[in-house]
Amino acid sequence: MIKTGAQILWECLEHEGVTHVFGYPGGAILPAYDALKHSKIHHVLVRHEQGATHMADGYARASGQTGVAVATSGPGATNMVTGIATAMLDSSPIVCITGQVGSKLIGSDAFQETDITGITLPITKHNYLVTRADELARTMREAFYVARSGRPGPVLVDITKDAQQSSCEFDWEAAKPQLPGYRPDLSPAPKEYEKALELIHSSKRPVILLGHGAIVSGAMREVRDLAERTGIPVALTLLGLGALPASHPLNLGMMGMHGEAWVNHTIQEADLLIALGMRFDDRVTGNLKTYAPNAKKIHVEIDPAEINKNVKVDVALVGDLREVLHAMLPKIESLDRSDWLDFIDRLKGDSAVRDIQNLPDSGHLYAAHVINDLWREARGSNTVVVTDVGQHQMWEAQYYKHEEPRSLITSGGLGTMGFALPAAIGVKVARPEAEVWVVVGDGGFQMTMCELATIVQENLKINIAIINNGFLGMVRQWQEFFYDRNYQATPLLNPDFAKVAEAYGIRNATVTQRSQVVPTVQAARQHDGAVLINFHVEQEDTVYPMVAAGAALHEMIRRPSPIVETAADE
Amino acid sequence: MMNTFVVYVENKPGVLTRVASLFRRRAFNIDSLTVGRTEKPEVSRMTITVDADHDQARRIEANLYKLVNVLLVENITTEPAIVRDLAMIKVAATHEARSHVLELASVFRARVVDVAPESLIIEITGGEDKIDGLLEVLRPYGVLEMVRTGIVAMRRGNKSSLALSSSEEPAQATAEDDLSQSV
């Protein structure tokens, strides 16, 4: 059947199962928007193209499906760059569609022309420039396949205006992907399995390091089986939180720069690290020279380029985590590791972060209080917390106990401030039945708060908790520790966020006392529209423990003793 | 150490940029990169030399495979292979010097491809060492201009990467190969 490129575009998206796209129109993508009226796809109009990419990303992370963002050429496309890089670093499958000037004009510096395939080359898994309608169907199929298969990631498809306007025969079935060099399905050699099993069975002090790959691969059950049958404790990366329930007895908690002290000590004492779907990021390892010095390492990872990149490993199992564990589990022998677990328990008893609930209510409102109270009120299998980047993100990771995969959505690798609010829109669109909480700092909120309009326009029930300390808190913390308390450019003069919400017609509240936290959260949950709560928290609070950049993992800056003494009931 | 990769890629626009960008992005310094057609019209072949240790070389290979348009990567650094560079050297050759220059060219089995009253262009093919050797002995006469293609490489024997080879002939070293290794 003869169709225009614009019609083919939407039909391809429908074939890929897309129901929602996040976008912003403009000249070079107008033919596609014109054809939207014939499509069943719901278009969410954003306020900035960066927001569209974060929404597609949030959609993908919450659902496991591929998210789609649409923008025009030039500035529309370049505004997507931050969101694409965010998705790349966190292996999130999104497809970004951009309009491009007519193919005859390419290279002429035409109005709103930019080389977006060149710009996004290093931050996409792959990208395409489509100049003819008859290339579109195959390209779209390839784009979705590449985005979601193997190690997922963003794919950008740049479509010239004439390719959208011209017509050709459309046959989706016939337009099969042609990717002769693309091999997403790798599996380890049998002898690698044997080596791994030998190490696991002979180890006395093993730890599983669990990352985002477990969630992407859907290997939660297999990971749990492995841990339970071997009695091996599990430490999680930030993006791995939820892959094993926080309440599971073998779950140690988060590792790394702001991980719990006992987790980092456990890793340093281990004789075997079993890394599952994680990539030994510098925020997780600290100084590589002193990282887990006595441990052998097994790395199960889908991306061969991650093997021996940061940490040299003894056995590499390259493949899909779930499939690898499936193959391994029948040969796993159960072993008694109670000595090791007892040792870790003693580490815990000695260095556990004091229960924040016991901190005295001296008139101060601590961010950790807010998050811990939020967890007590809102926890449930259908609650998703979307965090931004900074202190509040780390407190959330420490004090909100995630039981389910995909219940924490956060920008890990790129650390993108401004991620939370738009990503939460994507989460809510993907999972309308979920209770969605945005936990965001006052700095990051102001980077993308224009998307409040999108929330209202789409009538989305999203709860926003601003952890407002009047500072770029994490940067201030670094200045406190490493720059002699020279608070350059970190104090923020903020608007009244309640009035901002008011202007958008969003219900709002301002909280300054601990006693107000629970009732305000309860009221927010009962309201059937969006709610914004402005929590005025302690201004110069600090995330503990902290491994300074470049320090050894066990060399942590700990909470100073006065607070510990008042908090501890020893 | 210097590693030699043979990389087969889809013959499509922009693929060279993707490969070059990868080396830049991962902070590996390309020493030489050549690209050209192969026996299959849809496939281009690159020969890339890059200074890297063993682990880095493996990561380069793995990262190349992450490029969707890359079909096959071979690290032939330690394998028996024919490695060739081509150079054109314009050398000053006045009347007195001319016969000496021609003699040197013939010792190196180089060809004179242009003769002008005051200069000659010498074309030489061979391993990089051989070309460096000729260059060294020509320098005193005055090298006016020099261009090299960068190396291309092919494994010896009937092993063929793309399984296209029907040749069953055993590997045979030619006289010129011996020269390239000895000079």
Image: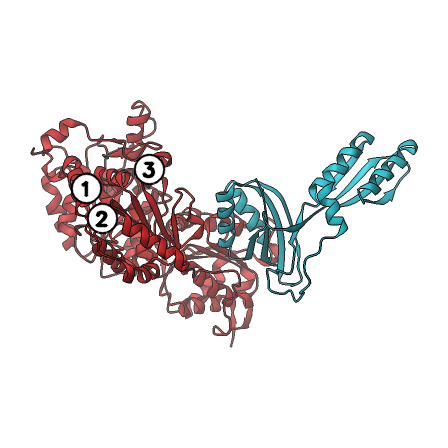
In the rendered structure, the residue with mark 1 lies on which chain? A
The percent coordinates of residue A66 (x first, y second) are 38, 60
Provide the letter of the chain coloured cyan: B
Mark 1 vs 3: CB contact within 8 A? no
| Relative side of B130 to A257, left or right | right
Secondary structure category for the residue under label 3: loop
Provide the letter of the chain coloured red: A
| Mark 1 and mark 2 on one chain | yes
Distance, label 1 to label 2, CA atoms, is 9 Å
Residue at the spot of label 3: A293
Tag of residue A344: 1
Query: Mark 3 or mark 2, which has the lower sequence index?
Result: 2
Q: Residues within 10 Å of mark 1 (few under 14, many from 20)?
A: many
Mark 1 vs 2: CB contact within 8 A? yes
Q: Nearer the viewer, residue A209 or A257?
A: A209
Distance, label 1 to label 3, CA atoms, is 18 Å
Asked if residue B23 shows in the view, the reply is yes
Work out whether A10 lies above or below A278.
below
In the rendered structure, the residue with mark 3 lies on which chain? A
The percent coordinates of residue A127 (x first, y second) are 50, 55
Considering every residue shown, the one lying at the far left of the view is: A569
User: Residue flagged by tag 2: what amino acid is it?
Assistant: Pro
The C terminus of chain A lies in which quarter of the figure?
top left
User: Residue flagged by tag 1: what amino acid is it?
Assistant: Ile
Tell me the quarter of the picture where residue A204 sits: top left
